[in-house]
Image: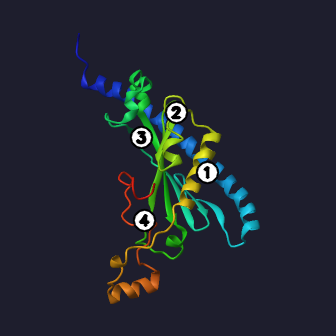
Amino acid sequence: MESQSPRDLILKTLKEKSSLKQDVFANTFSVFNSFKTIAKIMAIDLQKEAKSIDKRLIIEYKDKGEFEFELRVAGDLLIFTMHTNVFEFDKNHSVWRSSYLKNDYTRSYCGIINIFNFLTDSFKYNRVNDLGYAIGRVFVNKENHFFVEGKRQLGFLYNDFVNATIDEKYIRNVVESAILYSLEFDLYTPPFDSIKEISVLDMQQATESMQIKTGKRLGFRFQADSDEIE
């Protein structure tokens, strides 16, 4: 058999991978826009009910551009971002155990929607040293199959990559799970030793822009947090 020329290999790769990635991007972008629409509707609905509980409670949606939006729920701020690139799973990832991927490896290419949890006050008072936390990420492939890696409900309710096709019901459920997790994920007092010494400059800056570091859990890492936030 005659070997393929570099030109032919380039065209073959463009056909098999680059076009595929364009399809995955389009699917993920469509899903992300559905996240925006549903989050906005949910914010309006929840705000009406929240007012009857306490007029000080604020629930609002903010569009931050094509690939980002915010959902404020009282003292918590959920930030949803869509990555503009498409990824393939590492060969050691558990998804490769299924026949779904073994039968068609191109199903492993996914777009990613990340969900982060911050304190509302971190942005309100420009506390640039405050920490946010990755609480989930949604993977979407060329067939709109999806699953979620994340914390608590986000980590075990949405992991049927083989069968689950993302739709408006699933999107609403994911947003609700993210809100519930954030509301239950309480602010802990930082260790006293971490704040007992502070320079004059730090104090002046803290007074000006509230920059003493705050986070629900200091030292959080998405991939090594089994004890911190479960």
- Please state, as top left, top right, bottom left or bottom right, where the N terminus lies in the image: top left
Q: Earlier in the sequence, mark 2 or mark 4?
A: 2
* Amino acid at pointer 4: Arg
For the residues labelled 2 and 1, the Cα–Cα distance comes to 20 Å
At x 57%, y 61%, the residue is: 183
For the residues labelled 4 and 1, the Cα–Cα distance comes to 22 Å
Q: Earlier in the sequence, mark 3 or mark 4?
A: 3
Mark sitting on residue 217? 4
Q: How is the image coloured?
A: rainbow
Residue 94 falls left or right of residue 5: right
| Labels 3 and 2 touching (C-beta < 8 A) | no
Task: Name the residue carrying label 1.
Answer: 176
Q: Earlier in the sequence, mark 3 or mark 2?
A: 3
Q: Which quadrant of the figure has residue 179?
A: bottom right
* Residue 80 vertical placement versus 7 (above, below): below
| Labels 4 and 1 touching (C-beta < 8 A) | no
* Residue 7 vertical placement versus 78 (above, below): above
* Amino acid at pointer 3: Val
Q: Nearer the viewer, mark 4 or mark 1?
A: 4
Task: Name the residue carrying label 3.
Answer: 86
Residue 7, position in %: x, y? 28, 25
Q: Determine whether the residue tagged by mark 4 lies in a helix, strand or loop.
A: loop
Q: Determine whether the residue tagged by mark 1 lies in a helix, strand or loop.
A: helix
Q: Determine whether the residue tagged by mark 2 lies in a helix, strand or loop.
A: loop
For the residues labelled 2 and 4, the Cα–Cα distance comes to 33 Å
* Residue 50 vertical placement versus 90 (above, below): below
Mark sitting on residue 145? 2
At x 51%, y 71%, the residue is: 123
